[in-house]
């Protein structure tokens, strides 16, 4: 039985207005090569300086990832020649900002700690565009943008755990507001390294790059594990190499093999003094960390007794879980709020492709709807319809119910009258029902509800229908 061992490196863009070592603007959609200067272009004689905001945000991340912060860390040059790096070296850290952190994930066997080896600050490179007509273009706007590199220990065992870790990490980064962590914008880039082995020694690992979505990460890891096992089973050897994920063919391909792996000749960056972190900086950032995803997850499950899948949906966006809790505070039922949020509201937003911030339904709306249901003034289906109708208008619930005349029909006389009518209109179905086709009961309920514009109290309809049919 082969066992896979996976480690993951993540590069997350740090949300700052200017670059890491110069004053150039950080902007995703600027015209190419407009946010550049002599520092980030590496012209001779220029001196870099550090971006304080980026350092503070990196400290916040290190704390949220339970890591130990090095009071003194050191910037270093990682030397290599590549067209996306005009200086010929990348400024990174040889002594990292922080070490020994962890992220807690939920697995089938309960909680698991994914330990983090190191967290450091570095600068991004420019971006290459390879066109079809043998021309490559480069945009240096991204060159020098601050990045946080987060490296796990090789403790991940399969693609599922890898995805849970990446999701949780991305949630933490968003909760503490240090990055948009949008994979499509390249703000959150994942590079897993994978090896397989039959015993406790770690096998030879390969690294996969060019993964633009979590789906791609999942598929690439799975593919790599299977590819390596197949080679070993045939008596072959794994070559240590960097692979690229080919999204079109859904396979990993060799990018460069061991012979080609660069010797980076790291050395201390002579233009920057060591980075000294004070207790004051640490305490200031500690204050800014909100309740984090895993504690929120555990608290929601315990406090409201909700399922783990629903809790995962709620915590994925802190605004969603706050919204849920606010609605309960305002008096909405837990089950109702959960259902409305995770199916109706999420459905409305997905269908309209709108962000949560466009939603005009407030927690108060949910509490009001709940009150109307509890008082048997409307039924659940009407409540769901109302959510769809007021989603982007935010009309108050009572006003809407009155203006549309949606008050539930509970008057047994008029419901009985409607039931008589529909039984009259469907004599064949009635005969079949009386001969034992019980499934038709639902059909009669549906017909009666339809005739009353969906406004009848379904419990009363069910009861009366049963009584009337029994009498026949
Ligand atoms: Zn610059
Ligand atoms: Mn890096």
Image (cartoon, rainbow, N blue to C red):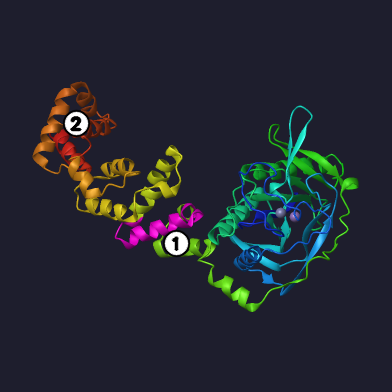
- Which mark is drawn over residue 155? none
Question: What x and y, as percent, mark residue 364?
Answer: 30, 56
Question: What x and y, as percent, mark residue 411?
Answer: 11, 42
Judge the density around disc 1: few (<14), some (14-19), many (≥20) Cα neighbours within 10 Å.
many
| Residue at image point 46% right, 46% down | 355
Question: What x and y, as percent, mark residue 155?
Answer: 71, 59
Task: Please tell me whether the stretch drawn in magenta is mainly helix, strand or loop.
Answer: helix
Q: Please state the extent of the stretch shown in magenta in the rendering.
A: 312-334
Vertical placement of 389 versus 168: above or below? above
| Gap in angstroms between the C-alphas marked 2 and 1 | 41 Å
Q: Secondary structure at mark 2?
A: helix
Q: Earlier in the sequence, mark 2 or mark 1?
A: 1
Q: Which residue is mark 2?
A: 451
Vertical placement of 301 versus 204: above or below? below
Inspect this view and state whether residue 172 appears: yes
Q: Is residue 453 magenta?
A: no
| Residue at image point 25% right, 49% down | 397
Q: Which residue is mark 1?
A: 300
Question: What x and y, as percent, mark residue 205?
Answer: 80, 50
| Residue at image point 83% right, 66% down | 270
Total count of labels: 2
Q: Is residue 2 left or right of 113 when viewed as pictured?
A: right
Does label 2 point to a residue whose CB lies under 8 Å from ligand 2? no
Vertical placement of 389 versus 187: above or below? above
Q: Quadrant of ligand 1?
A: bottom right
Residue 231, located in which quarter of the rendered image?
top right
Q: 25 and 352: which one is in front?
A: 25
Inspect this view and state whether residue 108 appears: no
Residue 437, located in which quarter of the rendered image?
top left
């Amino acid at each position: 039985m082969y066992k896979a061992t996976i480690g993951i490196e993540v590069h997350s863009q740090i949300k700052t207005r200017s670059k890491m070592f110069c004053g150039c603007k950080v902007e995703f959609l600027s015209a190419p090569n407009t946010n550049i200067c002599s520092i980030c272009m590496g012209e001779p004689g220029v001196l870099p300086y550090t971006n304080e905001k980026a350092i503070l945000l990196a400290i916040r991340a290190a704390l949220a990832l339970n890591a130990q912060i090095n009071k003194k860390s050191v910037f270093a040059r990682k030397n290599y020649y590549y067209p996306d790096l005009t200086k010929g070296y990348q400024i990174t850290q040889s002594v990292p900002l922080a070490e020994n952190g962890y992220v807690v994930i939920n697995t089938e066997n309960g909680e698991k700690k994914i330990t983090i080896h190191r967290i450091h600050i570095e600068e991004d490179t420019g971006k290459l565009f390879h066109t079809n007509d043998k021309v490559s273009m480069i945009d240096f706007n991204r060159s020098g943008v601050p990045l946080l590199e987060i490296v796990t220990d090789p403790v991940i065992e399969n693609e599922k755990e890898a995805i849970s870790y990446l999701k949780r990490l991305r949630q933490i980064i968003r909760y503490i507001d240090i990055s948009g962590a949008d994979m499509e914008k390249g703000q959150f880039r994942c590079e897993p390294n994978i090896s397989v082995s039959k015993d406790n020694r770690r096998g030879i690992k390969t690294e996969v790059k060019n993964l633009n979505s979590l789906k791609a990460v999942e598929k690439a890891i799975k593919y790599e594990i299977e590819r390596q096992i197949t080679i070993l089973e045939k008596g072959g050897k794994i070559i240590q190499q960097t692979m690229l994920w080919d999204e079109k063919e859904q396979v990993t391909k060799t990018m460069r093999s061991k012979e080609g792996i660069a010797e980076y000749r790291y050395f201390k960056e002579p233009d920057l003094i060591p980075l000294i972190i004070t207790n004051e900086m640490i305490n200031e950032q500690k204050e800014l960390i909100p309740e984090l995803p895993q504690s929120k997850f555990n608290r929601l499950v315990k406090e409201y007794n909700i399922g783990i899948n629903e809790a995962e949906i709620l915590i994925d966006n802190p605004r969603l879980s706050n919204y849920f809790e606010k609605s309960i505070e305002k008096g909405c039922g837990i089950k109702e709020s959960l259902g409305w949020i995770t199916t109706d509201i999420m459905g409305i937003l997905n269908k309209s492709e709108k962000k949560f911030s466009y939603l005009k339904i407030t927690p108060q709306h949910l509490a009001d709807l709940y009150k109307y249901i509890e008082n048997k003034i409307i039924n659940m289906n009407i409540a769901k319809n109302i959510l769809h109708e007021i989603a982007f208008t935010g009309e108050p619930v009572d006003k809407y119910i009155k203006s549309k005349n949606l008050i539930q029909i509970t008057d047994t006389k008029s419901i009985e009258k409607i039931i008589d009518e529909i039984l009259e209109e469907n004599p064949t179905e009635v005969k079949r029902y009386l001969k034992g086709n019980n499934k038709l009961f639902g059909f009669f309920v549906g017909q009666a509800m339809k005739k009353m514009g969906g406004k009848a109290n379904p419990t009363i309809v069910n009861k009366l229908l049963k009584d009337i049919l029994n009498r026949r």
